[in-house]
Image: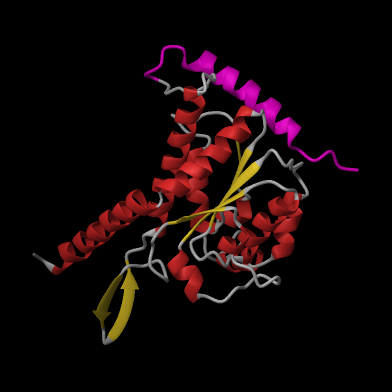
């Protein structure tokens, strides 16, 4: 085996280990969380989704997405997810500043009307990102259940960075542990006399959990005899346009109910 193939093979093995960990240890937590989400959607309210940086990827994986359903409101603030230029406008320095700003999280939440019947899923590998903790705190203050998806290994080895000295798992009502190692990257290599870490796992773990939550929620709603509008696949579903128009109308109605009225 060449050195180049060894890296990715080791990473694949680590991915398989994460899948095994989640599927063998987190099923009860996922069932509890999907029960909360199903109750929220069943009552005509919204399950909000939040993540910053790469933790926004599972948000987009859940909604809007082929095979997803109505009842979710993603909070994907552009400056918190678009830092690919690294420098200049929408660069990493600005992203780093606002991701570590609880005040920015409070300003985001000023846009929404949150009810105790709503809920939120907050994705954060470290569980210490100030803006993610703030979003969880804001929902908690409204009496809305908080579902935290995080690495407890990392969170327990890191210091809190939120002014309240809280971590995500200390705010959440239900915690789903991804099992991802502290620091996220899973391989240690030697290069030019340095020990370097490569092979991140959090995005893979997040998207696995996101789909498990989504599918479990859909299953619960169907078992209750509820109508579950599923996003169609254009090119495969003959009535895709008509179904999509219905979904857009109904999502718009849900969204209007959850937008802050303002002064």
Quadrant of residue 115 within the rendered picture: top right
259 magenta-colored: yes
**What percent of the width, then of the height, locates residue 102?**
70, 64
Asked whether 126 or 247 is in front, the reply is: 126
Q: Position of residue 49 (x, y in %)?
A: 58, 45
Location of the C terminus (image quadrant)? top right
Residue 86 appears at what percent x and percent y? 52, 64
Residue 197 spot, x, y in % from top left: 33, 73
Q: Is residue 249 left or right of residue 106?
A: left
Question: What residue is shown at x 68% (from left), y 66% (from top)?
Answer: 101
Q: List the single residue furthest toward the left.
A: 1
Residue visible at 56% across and 56% down?
Answer: 52
Whether residue 54 appears in magenta in the rendering, the answer is: no
Q: What is the magenta range? A: 235-263
| Colour logic | secondary structure
Name of the residue lying farthest toward the right: 263
In the image shown, does 240 or 14 lie closer to the viewer?
14
Left or right, 151 with reference to 204:
right
Q: The N terminus lies in which quarter of the figure?
A: bottom left
The answer to whether residue 165 of the structure is visible from this angle is yes
Residue at the image point whose x is 48% and y is 30% from the top: 220
Residue 112 occupies which quadrant of the picture?
top right
Residue 236 occupies quadrant: top left
The residue under the point 54% across, 19% down is 227
């Amino acid at each position: 085996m060449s050195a180049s193939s060894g890296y990715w093979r080791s990473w694949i093995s680590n991915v398989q280990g994460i899948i095994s960990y989640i599927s063998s240890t987190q099923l009860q937590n996922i069932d509890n969380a999907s029960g909360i989400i199903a109750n929220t959607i069943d009552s005509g309210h919204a399950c909000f989704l939040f993540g910053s940086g790469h933790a926004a990827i599972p948000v987009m994986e859940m909604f809007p997405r082929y095979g997803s359903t109505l009842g979710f409101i993603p909070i994907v603030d552009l400056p918190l997810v678009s830092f690919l230029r690294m420098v200049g406008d929408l660069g990493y320095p600005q992203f780093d500043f606002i991701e570590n700003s609880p005040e920015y999280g409070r300003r985001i939440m000023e846009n929404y009307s949150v009810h105790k019947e709503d809920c939120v899923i907050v994705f954060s590998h470290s569980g210490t990102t100030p803006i993610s903790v703030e979003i969880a705190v804001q929902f908690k203050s409204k009496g809305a259940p908080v579902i935290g998806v995080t690495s407890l290994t990392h969170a327990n080895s890191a210091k809190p960075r939120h002014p309240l000295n809280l971590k995500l798992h200390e705010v959440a009502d239900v915690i789903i542990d991804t099992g991802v190692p502290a620091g996220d990257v899973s391989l240690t290599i030697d290069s030019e006399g340095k020990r370097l870490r490569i092979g991140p796992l959090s995005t893979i773990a997040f998207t696995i959990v996101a789909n498990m939550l989504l599918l479990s929620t859909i299953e619960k709603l169907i078992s209750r005899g509820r109508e579950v509008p599923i996003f169609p696949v254009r090119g495969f579903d003959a009535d895709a346009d008509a179904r999509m128009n219905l979904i857009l109308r109904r999502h718009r109605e849900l969204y209007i109910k959850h937008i802050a009225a303002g002064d």
